[in-house]
Image (spheres, rainbow, N blue to C red):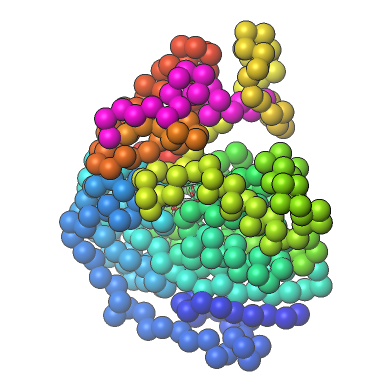
Amino acid sequence: MICYRHGKAFTHSKRYHSLTQNSFILSFKILSLSSMLQIHENVSLKNFNTFGIEAYARYFVEINHKEELQELFADIQWHNINRLVLGGGSNMLFTQNFDGLVIKINIRGIEHRINHNEVIVEAGAGEIWNIFVDYCVNWGFAGVENLSLIPGSVGASPIQNIGAYGVEVKDVFASCEAFEIASGNFVYFSNTDCKFAYRESIFKQEKKGEYIVCSVKFKLSTQANLNISYGAISAELEKQGIIEPNIKDVSKVVSEIRVSKLPDPSTIGNAGSFFKNPVISKAEFDKVHSQYPKIVHFIVDNGIKLAAGWLIEQCDWKGKVVGETGTWKNQALVLVNHGNATGKEVFDLSEAIIQSVYQKFGIKLEREVNIL
Ligand SMILES: Cc1cc2nc3c(=O)[nH]c(=O)nc-3n(C[C@H](O)[C@H](O)[C@H](O)COP(=O)(O)OP(=O)(O)OC[C@H]3O[C@@H](n4cnc5c(N)ncnc54)[C@H](O)[C@@H]3O)c2cc1C
């Protein structure tokens, strides 16, 4: 078995002791803990959400090591207050100030172990998702290349089971270590424990708010088994004359497609797809299909998935500007902040879109973005 480590702040735990037989790991530096824990008051969240919406947190703390969570919650006052765990803030809409404690997760570090064709890559919850993807792609580990350039952190990836271009986190998720707020213990969740579904997991349902993900293990492969069935990927590979693509080609092409379609949050505030693609029954589909034969749809395990972007576009919302907000010119599913939008303005626009799609198609869109 080969084992490598990269990054700088995995915390010292029993579990990592078992990995320290390799000299590469022994040289890894463990940073000091408790002196760093500081609670700040009235902190602007504008730079902590990709919508770039102004809102203030009453209390704000940054967690660099998982043990700091035990230290934080040793104080009972943080059990009895509203809490919000924050990664990159790329799936959040703040509609008001947050009257509670924001816990920003910065736990870093990436390491991997190769066992024959299988690789386990473990990353700290605060690692930037795309840095983790680049790490895997550069090492030649297959499995996450279709998820290139998704904004956000590793820790948030299982929360809504992120997905793109035919791959979801559930396809590569092995387990995660999470802090259980009520008990103060660290516990593990396997893939089945997480109850993954389309943009869903146990962390958004029955265990909502109870756990903080500290690190995630992914099961990847040294043997590329590329998934290029998605039309846009195969078309772009063909356009670029790439006949036998490798992992790097797929990652590059996915990144290029994303850049061409989606607004860059560093220049125009947004949170990616604002709504989920609705999944309806065959009977419901037949009804709407007979009226709208061109409706964009995909067959999935539990029914028929409709393209929410298409539904919104048919209601003439694509590229519309409403005050400081609107929908993106190349993708109606993305709501944007044109500069000084408030969270309420964006929320009201989302409500108007839900109403008009419902009136035209009888289908109720559900928000993917977390509303606070
Ligand atoms: C331009 C753009 C494109 C996008 N494209 C996609 C896409 O293709 N596919 C897709 O699935 N998503 C996409 N998204 C949405 C977003 O990238 C993902 O939802 C991402 O996982 C959010 O990560 P984050 O760290 O920013 O989470 P945040 O927005 O900070 O948090 C999201 C949720 O996770 C919780 N959370 C965060 N970290 C932890 C933790 N360590 N422990 C417990 N709970 C935690 C938060 O409390 C919150 O409920 C896109 C967003 C943007 C801006």
102 vs 367, left or right, is left
Nearer-the-camera pick, 123 or 292: 292
Q: Quadrant of the C terminus?
A: top left
Report if residue 362 lies within the magenta region. Answer: no
* Residue 41: % across, % down: 18, 60
Residue 329 placement (x, y as % from top left): 45, 33
Which quadrant, please, contains the N terminus?
Answer: bottom right
- Determine whether 218 is above or below 333 in the image: below
Is residue 264 placed above or below 126 in the rendered structure? above
Q: Is residue 290 visible?
A: yes
The one of 172 and 76 positioned closer to us in this rendering = 172
Query: Looking at the picture, does residue 153 appear above or below residue 109?
Result: above
Task: Indicate whether residue 317 is drawn in magenta.
Answer: yes
Which region is colored magenta? 304-324
* Residue 33, picture quadrant: bottom left
Q: Is residue 206 visible?
A: no
Q: Residue at x 53, y 49 (%)?
A: 259
Residue at image position (80%, 64%) is: 223
- Residue 81: where, in percent of width, then height? 26, 51
Q: Nearer the viewer, residue 195 or 287?
A: 287
- Residue occupying the point 43% across, 23% down: 317
Q: Image height check: is 195 above or below 212?
A: above
| In the displayed structure image, the side of residue 251 where residue 351 appears, left or right | left
Image location of residue 284, percent across then percent down: 63, 14
